[in-house]
């Protein structure tokens, strides 16, 4: 951690306390309050931890005002344009872009670990046929600790490495199997001759009865979805993984906890909510009605997929995702899909309306990723599982970083207690 030449002074009941201030390489300064309770007997109050730094990290940096997202210092738009998902995985895991040989070794390692233990198939068949794929993924990923005993000890660096590789390699297989099970089709095994994104699409859409060839445009679009969602700093699911890890839980349990948190509609369900909104609009001729509602302060309706809680200007991922969306729609067309027709027209209408420009409500990554996944043929129930596949490397990178931090402690947030104080128990006959 950086030197702390600056301090903040907090005065409580006439008593002053000096608190160290740390200056990061980017972002706002941070006041260190770790000794505040011991010195002053008070806690800070920050619901949602929106003004609290829970850790120090070197992985991802976001500047919402500038619309900036950096992985190890590299802008996300450059990575999405020039790199690919597994190279970004290597960057997040190890802190530097790989050499050609390092990348080849890493890709080969991931490719040859994509199969899951055959007995794990029984877990899928234990779920109801109409189970949500996310419910299946939470259970199956958590159950990996029952099958891979040689990579469950987080204190062993070699086991951490094995677990990291296994999770990145097997998560697409698990997500694809959850999808196949939900639609009643047979599982399709991974193929070592396909790249990461193509292999996932093949496992999702191939059937034993005929040959399925993955279109390179769709594969590239899928790879970009994975890349653009790989990590996003200390969000809810990443914080969940870190909190679970702080207890010493095994890596599979930690990632399963992250998947469970991602399932929440306020976190991982944004692109699904966007598609549901497009279906609610229904037809192109109703777009002006919904545009007017979005501009009406007295109407609770909001355009999903426009603007972003973190990015106050524009989402740096959206430009690249829009390019992929245009390529996919040019390939597959929108003529027979009213949802995609609405999406294209809504995008054009919103971008041409000064109101949305003034409010900086530009289409975000969820708007375009939802369009792409819909065009590919994925049901909305698969949008969040695909997000989980993408985010796995981010969770693992943050998990590994935390385990290597000598300052790591078990997470234990405090509270502002507003309940009853001590009172005596009353016997039931006297209540």
Image (spheres, rainbow, N blue to C red):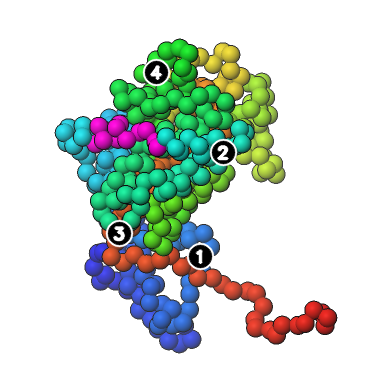
Asked if disc 4 and disc 3 are in contact, CB closer than 8 Å, the reply is no
Q: In this view, does 197 lie to the left or right of 97?
A: right
Q: Earlier in the sequence, mark 2 or mark 3?
A: 2
Magenta span of residues: 106-117
Mark 2 vs mark 1, CA separation in Å: 42 Å
**Picture quarter containing residue 199?**
top left
Judging depth in this view, the residue of 395 and 329 nearest the camera is 395
Q: Mark 4 points at which residue?
A: 214
Q: Where does residue 171 sit, x and y in percent of width and height? A: 41, 38
Is 157 part of what is drawn in magenta?
Answer: no
Labels 1, 3: front one:
3
Q: Mark 1 points at which residue?
A: 46
Judging depth in this view, the residue of 261 and 265 nearest the camera is 261
Asked if disc 1 and disc 3 are in contact, CB closer than 8 Å, the reply is no
Q: Name the residue under label 2.
A: 126
Mark 4 vs mark 3, CA separation in Å: 41 Å
* Residue appearing at x 38%, y 48% in the figure: 395
Q: Earlier in the sequence, mark 4 or mark 1?
A: 1
Q: Name the residue under label 3.
A: 155
Labels 4, 1: front one:
4
In the picture shown, does residue 310 fall above or below 1?
above
* Residue appearing at x 63%, y 21% in the figure: 284
Q: Where does residue 258 sit, x and y in percent of width and height? A: 46, 49
Q: Where does residue 142 sit, x and y in percent of width and height? A: 46, 47
């Amino acid at each position: 951690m950086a030197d702390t030449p600056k301090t903040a002074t907090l005065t409580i009941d006439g008593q002053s306390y000096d608190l160290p201030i740390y200056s990061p390489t980017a972002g706002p300064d941070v006041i260190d309050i770790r000794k505040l309770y011991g010195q002053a007997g008070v806690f800070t109050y920050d619901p949602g931890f929106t003004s609290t730094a829970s850790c120090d990290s070197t992985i991802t940096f976001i500047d919402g005002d500038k619309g900036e997202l950096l992985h190890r210092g590299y802008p996300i738009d450059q990575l999405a344009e020039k790199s690919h998902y597994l190279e970004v995985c290597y960057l997040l895991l190890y802190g530097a872009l790989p050499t050609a040989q390092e990348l080849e070794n890493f890709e080969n390692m991931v490719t040859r670990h994509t199969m899951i233990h055959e007995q794990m198939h029984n877990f899928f068949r234990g779920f109801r046929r109409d189970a949500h794929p996310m419910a299946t993924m939470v259970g199956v990923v958590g159950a990996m600790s029952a099958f891979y005993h040689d990579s469950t000890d987080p204190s062993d660096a070699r086991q951490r490495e094995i677990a990291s590789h296994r999770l990145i390699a097997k998560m697409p297989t698990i997500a694809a199997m959850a999808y196949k099970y939900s639609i009643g089709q047979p599982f399709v095994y991974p193929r070592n001759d396909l790249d990461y994104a193509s292999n996932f699409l093949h496992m999702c859409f191939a059937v034993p009865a005929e040959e399925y060839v993955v279109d390179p445009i769709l594969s590239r679009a899928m790879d970009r979805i994975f890349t653009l969602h790989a990590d996003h700093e200390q969000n809810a699911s990443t914080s969940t993984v870190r909190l679970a890890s702080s207890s010493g839980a095994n890596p599979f349990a930690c990632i399963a906890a992250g998947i469970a948190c991602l399932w929440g509609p306020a976190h991982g369900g944004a692109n699904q909510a966007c598609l549901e909104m497009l279906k609610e609009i229904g037809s192109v001729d109703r777009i002006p009605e919904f545009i007017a509602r979005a501009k009406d302060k007295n109407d609770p309706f909001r355009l999903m997929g426009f603007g972003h809680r973190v990015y106050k200007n524009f989402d740096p991922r959206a430009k690249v995702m829009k390019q992929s969306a245009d390529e996919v729609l040019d390939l597959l067309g929108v003529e027979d899909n009213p949802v995609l027709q609405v999406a294209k027209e809504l995008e054009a209408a919103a971008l041409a309306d000064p109101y949305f420009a003034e409010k900086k409500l530009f289409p975000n990554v969820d708007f375009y990723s939802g369009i792409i996944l819909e065009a590919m043929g994925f049901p909305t129930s698969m949008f969040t599982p695909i997000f989980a596949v993408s985010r796995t490397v981010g969770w693992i990178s943050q998990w590994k970083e935390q385990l290597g931090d000598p300052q790591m402690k078990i997470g234990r947030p405090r509270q502002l207690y507003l309940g009853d104080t001590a009172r005596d128990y009353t016997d039931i006959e006297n209540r």
